Amino acid sequence: MAIVTRFDTPASLTDTAVPAFYTHWHNFIASNMSTVAGSGTAVGEFYDPSEVDVTIAAERQLVWMAFPRQELVARRDDRRAAFIFADSDPGGRDPQNEYCEWHVTRNKAGKITKVVFVTESPEYWQQLWDDDRAAVVNLYRTLLNNPGIAETDIGPGGIYDQFNAFNTTNGIIHLIQGINKLRLAIGLAQGSVNTGTARDNYETFPPAATNVDPRVVFDVGALARKPLSISLGEPIGLYIAGFDDTGWTKPDGSPVGNYWTIVRGVPGMALRVEYQVPPGEGFVVGDIRIGGRPIEWGGQIAEHVTVRIGGVAGTRARA
């Protein structure tokens, strides 16, 4: 694999015509990537592909469920309570800690009409704001179908507020939960190359009680023990890998249609996905049944959404 000369934006987005933004984004990724040699047992390393040339032996997609595992574990005997809790904090979305967050829209009757899932990092939007505020405002207006959004609504005093009303209570643009940051995802991959004296994943120390941490720690650790040099695949980003509505039914009991729309990104590298029934169908999302139960909470759909980050592994010449 040739050395990366410039890290690409997530899903190769081109949200601005300001050249400096793409340089700044490369610098952000580069500043969070470093070649970290393994220690202890003979393990591989995490490497910076902008500095190290590696012959790629394999690519691996690290995939996990979007619904927070710890909520299911904590409420294993009451799934409804888990769904309610995961949807309970629209202003902060703290329970949604799997690098995927969602926002639910309801009609006057309280039924869900739309659920939007995002994996876009706050770092991307902060950098875009720093380089091209007008682009951020226009994107907010377009994505939320609200031409009345002003710069002061999302950046009072010229300072971008990731917790503005249009990214919390009145909509969703990007991730805001405390650990849902791209730099932390990169750090998780870096820290997973060395599993100490573990000879296999059965001996690996249990990671955090999420879906993502075990997936990354186990997969990266296994590759490192081969040993291989490991990094994240371009374009580096957190993505919605897929969504599955198998077995979901309309009010009349027939299978649902394809009501998913990728708004940002492309299949396999989606950054924003919306689930909404077309008006002509005569019913709303809240009328759909999953396993015979009506959709009352966004988390019920999140259980059928998967998230991923791409990894690459190979070997390099050593002195």
Image (cartoon, rainbow, N blue to C red):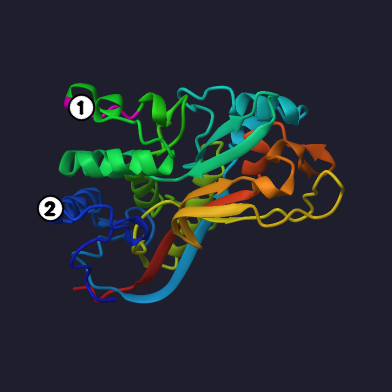
Quadrant, the C terminus: bottom left
Looking at this view, is 253 or 268 the one in front?
A: 253
Query: Of callouts 2 and 1, which one flags the residue occurring earlier in the amino acid sequence?
Result: 2
Side of 314 where 289 appears, left or right: right
153 lies left or right of 117:
left
| x then y, percent, for residue 73 | 67, 32
Q: Is residue 132 above or below residue 167?
A: below
Q: Would you identify the image quadrant in which residue 5 lies?
A: bottom left
Q: Main secondary structure of the magenta part?
A: loop
- Count of picture labels: 2
Comparing 195 with 17, the one in front is 17
Q: Which portion, as a residue range, is magenta?
A: 158-162
In terms of image quadrants, where is residue 227?
Answer: bottom left
Question: In the picture shown, does residue 79 fall above or below 251?
Answer: above
User: x%, y% of residue 38?
Assistant: 32, 56
Say the numbered circle drawn on residue 159: 1
Mark 1 residue crowding within 10 angstroms, few (<14) / some (14–19) / many (20+): few
Say above or below: 206 vs 261: above
Residue 20 tag number: 2
Residue closest to the eye, 175 or 207: 175
Residue 312 in the image: state x and y as whole percent.
39, 67
In the rendered view, does 284 fall on the left or right side of 123?
right
Q: Is residue 134 magenta?
A: no
Which kind of residue does numbered mark 1 sit on? Ile
Q: Residue at x 50, y 35 (%)?
A: 97
